[in-house]
Amino acid sequence: MSIDIYVRLTAERQLRKGRPIVRVTKAQAERNRVHIVATAARLFRERGYDGVGVAELMAAAGFTHGGFYKHFRSKADLMAEASASGLAQTAARAEGLDPAEFVERYVSREHRDGRGDGCTVAALSGDAARQPVDIRAEFAAGIEKLLTVLQAHSGTRGDVDQGAARALAIDTLAHSVGAVMLSRACPDGSPLADEILDVCRAGILASLTHGNVDGSEAGGPEA
């Protein structure tokens, strides 16, 4: 059933029931869409792509199941858009942070326990690996953006250091994501879950100190 037919039939039902037909402006429709995407991004981070259906998702956003198809062709389309939105949020939160500050916030109990408000990479990378290419492409673009943000604050000294800065950013992000994912895999309140975060955070911060691409250790005198 096309969207136009769905809308017409819905209007006819409303008229038969004596209900007024409420026209939604384009601006309101766009706000509704943004709200649905934000709700989906949070629920997907909490439960995974397969852990929440369209009807439940729309109810959580305050809309009917049928209204979904006014905005999206399929759940897969929403998954891709919600992933892109969540990844953009993660990159925006990292803006202005140097790598050490990023690690302190990322490899933390607060981030681990706040799955719905946390990083899409840590929450959904495992799920994304089994999804169609368009969703994995959104992850690749989002990860690339996050690496660019981390590299921008790595203290490089020109093009000669760009390769080393990128390698350090990849290493930092991969270890940080892995630490959160391993910690979340343990039972809530498990001593091991906290131990993983503590050990990994200390190790990543140490690697940032010794792997500083400007050739000197953090806080050390210049040659």
Image (spheres, rainbow, N blue to C red):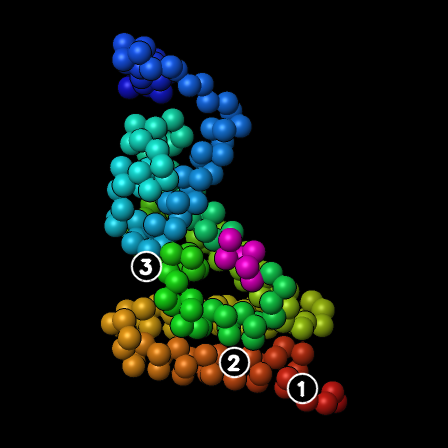
Give left or right: position of 103 versus 222: left
Q: Residues within 10 Å of mark 3 (few under 14, many from 20)?
A: few
Q: Is residue 209 above or below residue 24?
A: below
CA separation, marks 3 and 2? 25 Å
The outermost residue toward the right is: 223
Distance from Cα at disc 2 to Cα at disc 1:
14 Å
- x%, y% of residue 7? 35, 17
Q: Is residue 92 magenta?
A: yes
Q: Is residue 220 left or right of residue 185?
A: right
Above or below, comparing residue 190 to residue 8 in the picture: below
For label 1, the crowd category at 10 Å Cα-Cα, with few meaning under 14, some 14 to 19 and many 20 or more, is few
Q: Give the class, few, some or many, for how many residues have Cα within 10 Å of label 2's Cα (few <14, many ≥20).
A: some
Kind of residue sitting beneath label 3: Gly
Reading the image, the residue beneath label 2 is 205
Question: In terms of image quadrants, where is residue 116?
Answer: bottom left
Residue receiving disc 1: 219
- Identify which residue, 196 or 7, lies in the foreground: 7
Q: Is residue 9 visible?
A: no
Q: Give the residues drawn in magenta, as a range.
A: 89-94
Label 3: which residue?
126
The residue drawn where x is 57% and y is 85% is 210
Q: Nearer the viewer, mark 1 or mark 3?
A: 1
Query: Quadrant of residue 107 in the image?
Result: bottom left
User: Circle 1 sits in a helix, a strand or a loop, which is it?
Assistant: loop
Identify the residue at horizontal 56%, vertical 72% (top origin): 101
Residue at the far front in the pictured view: 18
Local SS, label 2: helix
Q: Amino acid at mark 1?
A: Gly
Amino acid type of the residue tagged 2 in the rendering: Leu
Q: Nearer the viewer, mark 3 or mark 2?
A: 2
Mark 3 falls on what kind of element?
helix
